[in-house]
Image (spheres, rainbow, N blue to C red):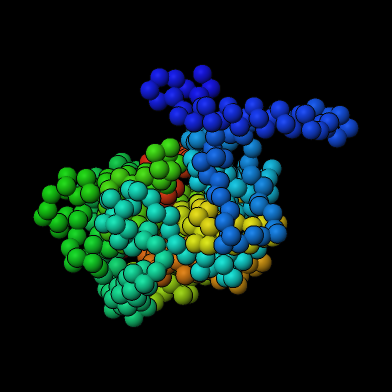
Amino acid sequence: MPFGSGRRSCPGVSFALQVLHLAFSRLLHAFNLATPSDQPVDMTERPVIHYLSSRPRTAKSRVSNTRAAPERDGAWPIIGHLPLLGGSQLPHITLGAMADKYGPIFTIRLGVQRALVVSNWEIAKELYTSCDVVISSRPKFRAAKHLGYNYAMFGFCPHGPYLRELRKITSMELLSSRRLELLKRVRVSETEICIKELHKVWSEKKNYSGYLLVEMKQWFGDLTLNVILRMIAGKRYFGATVAGNEAEARRCQKVMRAFLHYLGLFLVSDMIPFLGWLDNLIAGGGDTTTVMLIWALSLLLNNRHALKRTQDELDAHIGKDRQVNDSDINNLVYLQAVVKETLRLYPAAPLSGPREFAEDCTVGGFHVRKGTRLIMNLGKLQRDPKLWSNPADFRPERFLTTHKDVDVKGQHFELIPFGAGRRLCPGINFGLQMLHLVLATLLHSFQLSTPVDAPVNMTESAGLTNVKATPLEVLLAPRLSPNLY
């Protein structure tokens, strides 16, 4: 039944058969036919996905002489390479392994969408400079339309006048250097309050050895969310002085974590579905800062020499007669190196934010079609052995010697944990200020270790942000005089 049957059989069956018979008979009657060197004809069929995703050329189509980037083999019909990204291994690790075989720029198919995967700093520089306008838009997911108020969400709205206006308002009213300086008292006072509350719990519940067991993932999350909510709404969600419903606060925190988890999954339904709409400044800012703090402390606990050097630096510059001030951070060069090395090894978003090519473009000598998704694999790019000696090792000292002039603000493309170009993370200054202040205050205030001195489990979890998969349980005891808490 090549033409189907019943009421919905092909209505053009008679016409097609007439043309087929007539054209074929005349061709065979008029010509002797053969193949070059009498080779057999390749009978490979074309997968359905190619029919779905190919574009007919028109007179207005721009024809490029450059070739397309290599495509990873093994694409399934309809769903493409999605099965390869849905296994137990995290997507940025899977894509990194593909880069070892196919090179630093290649393509995969996410359903019927083509995606360009990049893991090379030179290509990243080309994209974020000469091609920056072309890649400044976000993909228009159906979920972003229906759950994000028709693409109104700040972090995922398409490039255009709306985004420029929203970014202008946000930068001027909340995230500018001047506004962050005016709001400095919020992050400083909230950090002090949380340290005091932690000391109070220690004094009430310490064990026979004088240590308190604390789950630091939750502590970091409560602190950063309190800071952001106080900046935006003037209220705290967690702590002894909060009169609200903690159960409600925990539900809110859980939803925001789930939001970013599902946002980063590659699913058949729409590649990157949303759980629901939340303001990106709260969900994104709170979660990414928490993730960075968790990884920084985890790395220090697994590298006790670095932890000791950080605390020695704090004692040398600050002493033990006062707490850390915001103005101290500039003098803490080793602490800054620890932060940079953390962001290199464990960027909060290892595949960066999703982008889409707004028009045809040439990247790294390859032609890229309009509508192609861009995946910047920071997890691979920032561990390139050509740029970093012993790239998998935690070595903050590299940022005091060989890489002392490299920063994380989008100008050095071998280290771009916050992205680069027009869609550089607008909260980069806030995130760095929080990261340095909270980490410095915590390490200065408490002696830290793990239960039975066991190494910290560094397993990552899937999602837009790679939060640590397991709890971070830490034993702590005060380092300073009780009157300083």
**Of residues 297 and 41, which is closer to you in this image?**
41
Q: On the rendered image, what quadrant is the C terminus found in?
A: bottom left
Residue drawn 43% across the image and 55% down it:
139
Q: Residue furthest bottom?
A: 178
Q: Residue furthest right?
A: 37
97 horizontally vs 146: left or right:
right
Residue 338 sits above or below residue 39 on the image: below
Residue 325 sits above or below residue 222 on the image: below
Q: Residue furthest left?
A: 243
**Of residues 187 and 265, which is closer to you in this image?**
265
379 horizontally vs 484: left or right:
right
- When asked about the image quadrant of residue 36, the answer is top right
Residue drawn 80% across the image and 27% down it:
40
Residue 450 position, x and y percent, is 42, 43
Residue 134 position, x and y percent, is 52, 65
* Number of on-image labels: 0
Residue 343 position, x and y percent, is 50, 58
Residue drawn 53% across the image and 44% down it:
53
